Amino acid sequence: MSQIANISSKFSPAGLRDKTRGDKVIWAIVVVLSLVSLLVVYSATNSLAYKLYKGNTFVYLFKQIAFITLGIIIVYFAHRVNYTIYSRVAKMLFYISIVLLIYTLFFGAKINDGSRWIKLPIINLTVQTSDIAKLALFMYLSRLLSKKQDVIKDFKKGFLPLMMPIVIICGLIAPANLSTALLTGATSMLLLFIGRVSFKHIALVGAAVAVPVIILIAIAGAYYDKAEGKTKELPAVLSAGRIPTWIKRVQDFMYAEKSEAPYQVLQAKIAVAKGGMFGLGPGNSEQRNFLPHPYSDYIYAIIIEEYGLIGASFIVFIYMVFLFRSIRLFRKCPYAFGAFLALALSFTLVIQAMTNMAVNVGLFPVTGVTLPLVSMGGSSFLFTCLAIGIILSVARNVEDAEGSLEPAKEELA
């Protein structure tokens, strides 16, 4: 009887609260976004599943339930690990990620002309190595920032050791995924700014990055035929790798009114226009039948179409609350590594979310990034769950530290 009582106590509300420590608001956000994901993924894949699986519309829903279940398990176990362990493995994981990125460039699975994935045998799951690299980079940067606060203003001792990992990781990601490289670099520089790195050093990096971006914009303008609304024939030097894709995306964004908009951009605009203030209602999306990747890259357009401006604003609000709670955690964490790590991971998730939403409503060029915790499951979904688990690990240790101080305060009183 006592064993049964112990088991039941573990699964009671009080027992679950004791096992799931950390910021309760972030836990609630994970649950809310997971529920939103189930609703929208089912709606976005309904027609596709019906065609591919002979009328069975629940196939992708069950897959998403499996991914969410696995993701919650990852969040739980990651948050139970003391975050200081992530500091110990940061350097090794950073070196491993470099090897994986190099391997991916030469031997990775090619999808949409980009070599971004490696395929895991047996389970047949493709993993985007940039997700591993981003996680490793932010762990390593957080470790370096916490150790170099005494020399953080020095160019050679503080700034250069911090910039080298950023340059290496972003440089290896860029050939196959320029948008992810730019977002990772921007997040890294934001972290350095908060970590008290000299602003003039950060501005120097910004100026250096601006040069190739300006060159790309200039090339896009020079090789665009305004009369016919299409790209001119590119020389051989500009036809290598994904350069033509970068040029085309910049042109589509710069000359949106003059050129024929890319198919997915046009369909996303139609979905947004149909949504209005209150939307067409859950499951009533029409553009899911025409929009490429309505369950991943363009899932926010489906949200707007079905739930309108009200639903779209709610999603933005959820991510802003997540960022606010992470900043609050940064301010409360007594140790620099945990504070920087929680902030870096939250920044990268929120910046990715805002970029995805901006692309969906036509405020940003097409990038191919997903909406964290909402887009249909894959390796990116699982790494998002791991990042949130690490943030909650920091929150749990902050909570434990605050609890250990309470008796001392009572004694002083």
Image: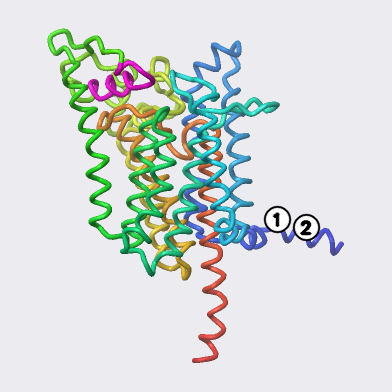
The residue lying furthest to the left in this view is 227
Using residue 399 as the reference point, say whether residue 293 is left or right of it.
left
Determine crowd level at label 1: few under 14, some 14-19, many 20+ residues with C-alpha closer than 10 A: few
Where residue 251 sits, quadrant-wise, is top left
- How many numbered marks are there? 2
Is 250 within the magenta?
yes
Which one is nearer the viewer's eye here, 17 or 175? 175
Residue placed under numbered mark 1 in the picture: 11
Q: Is residue 86 left or right of residue 226?
A: right
For residue 319, above or below residue 65? below
**In the rendering, at what x and y percent does residue 378 appear?**
55, 32
Picture residue at 24% right of the left edge, 21% below the top? 252
Whether label 2 touches label 1, CB < 8 Å? yes
Question: What's the amino acid at mark 2?
Answer: Ile
Report if residue 346 lies within the magenta region.
Answer: no
Amino acid type of the residue tagged 1 in the rendering? Phe
Residues shaded magenta:
237-252
Residue 256 placement (x, y as % from top left): 20, 21
Which residue is depicted at the point 33% across and 50% down? 189
- In this image, 160 relative to 295: left or right? left
Q: Is residue 323 above or below residue 316?
A: below
Where residue 98 sits: x, y (%)? 51, 40
Q: Residue at x 41, y 58 (%)?
A: 325
Q: Within the image, what quadrant is residue 362 found in?
A: top left
Under tag 2, what secondary structure? helix
Element type where label 1 sits in the image: loop
Q: Residue 366 location in percent, x, y?
A: 32, 27
Q: Main secondary structure of the magenta part?
A: helix
> Label 2, on which residue?
7
User: Measured along the vertical axis of the image, is residue 157 above or below residue 304?
Assistant: below
Marking on residue 382 = none
